[in-house]
Amino acid sequence: MNSDWMSHAWLWVIGACIGIGQLLASDAALSWRVVVGRALVSGGLGTAAGLILLAFDTVPSVALFAAAAALASVGTSVIERMLVTFADRWGAPR
């Protein structure tokens, strides 16, 4: 496995672990479906941190992993709220 795929895997693992940790810290009822779903969504958000490499191709791994942790921590609701705010500001129709 080359280093790009290993970085991708680590970004996903970091995101998934943070998502599961948030779920365990909450009062939500736990089921396998909820745990796996949260791991998949948070892992995907963590992997999205790789987009930083499009703008800065020499980002250190630690900074990339920190961005993955930040994206997984804010979750989908905050990211969706930010996108709606930007769309409203740019005058995009809903």
Image: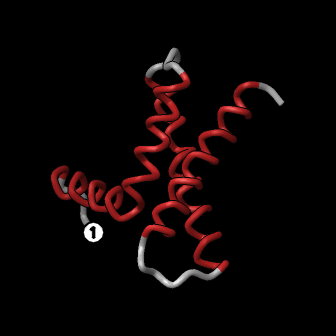
| Residue at screen point 60% across, 62% down | 39
**Quarter of the figure with the C terminus:** bottom left
Using the rendered view, name the quadrant where residue 88 is placed.
Answer: bottom left
Secondary structure at numbered mark 1 = loop
Compared with 64, 76 (above or below) is below
Percent coordinates x, y for residue 17 in the rendering: 58, 54
Which residue in the structure is indicated by mark 1? 94
Compared with 26, 46 (above or below) is above
Percent coordinates x, y for residue 83 in the rendering: 30, 55
| Residue at screen point 27% across, 55% down | 82
Compared with 37, 57 (above or below) is above
**Quarter of the figure with the N terminus:** top right
Say what amino acid the circle numbered 1 marks. Arg
Q: Is residue 92 left or right of residue 56?
A: left
Compared with 9, 45 (above or below) is below
Percent coordinates x, y for residue 11 in the rendering: 59, 41
Compare residues 68 and 57 and report the one nearer the observer: 68
| Residue at screen point 53% across, 57% down | 42
Which residue ends up furthest to the right in the rendered image? 1
